[in-house]
Amino acid sequence: MQPRRKNNGIVDSYNSSIRSIDKRPDLEVTMLPPKIAAIFTTIALLGISIHGLPAFAADTPRPPDPCDKELSVSDVDGILTGKATINHYSMSEGQQGEGCELGVAGNGVAFVDISIRRGDMQSFKNLLLLVPPSRKSLAGIGDEAYGTPTTDSNVPDAKETDLYARKGNLQCLVELHRSNGSGEKLVIPVGDDTIAAKLGGLCNKLFAARAGL
């Protein structure tokens, strides 16, 4: 990471990196292991270009994702403090185009990673097998939704709070990651339930946008 220029260095380099990551390769395996995906997300947040890495050098245009039309930086105004930018990549996507990230950076970083995909009720139940049993059922978000307690993130030195939601044959997964200490100060809602409700609002917006599709 380059030395900060005044107080905006990390923000500038984060914004520059996010603007540069606008293409993704056509890989046979479209879902990276969580820890590897987290490393690349952290690289983006710290403003380090990944275009020099061979595996990410393909010129195949990325497919549209939720942050192209359905979500905008204003949707995280009540979740993150500061000027948010978009990363057209998601750690939780199963296929390219299913997700994206909206994040802010200061002395720390905080970002929302969101993805939406099609799947029947059984596949959602299978997904929940990976969710800690301490998950909490939440009303008013799709047909069913579950929030998880804040825990250590796959992103190094960070925490995350997750939400899993389903409406019909659509499944939405949202993760709020923030670096320990300074990154936590970039998150507006306090408490797991409040965070989950805010994340659920993003899922509801995607469910509404895709109704009937």
Image: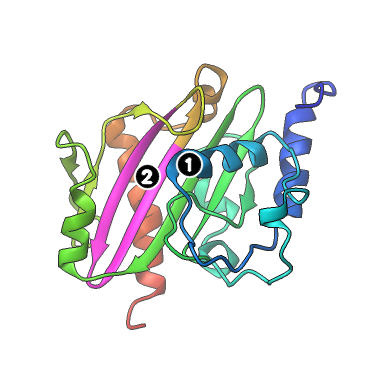
Quarter where residue 57 is shown: bottom right
Answer yes or no: do the residues labelled 1 and 2 have beta carbons within 8 Å?
yes
Say above or below: 99 vs 69: above
Which residue is nearer to you in this view: 210 or 119? 119
Which residue is nearer to you in this view: 192 or 129? 129
**Which residue position holds label 1?**
78
- Residue 198 is labelled as 2
The residue positioned farthest toward the right in the image shown: 5
Query: Which amino acid is tagged 2?
Result: Lys
The residue positioned farthest toward the bottom in the image shown: 212
210 sits left or right of 158 in the view: left
Which residue is nearer to you in this view: 154 or 184? 154
Tell me the quadrant of the picture where the N terminus can be found: top right
SS for callout 1: loop
194 drawn magenta: no
Q: Position of residue 181 (x, y in %)?
A: 52, 16
User: Which residues are drawn in magenta?
Assistant: 159-176
Q: Is the magenta stretch mostly helix, strand or loop?
A: strand
Q: Position of residue 177 (x, y in %)?
A: 47, 35
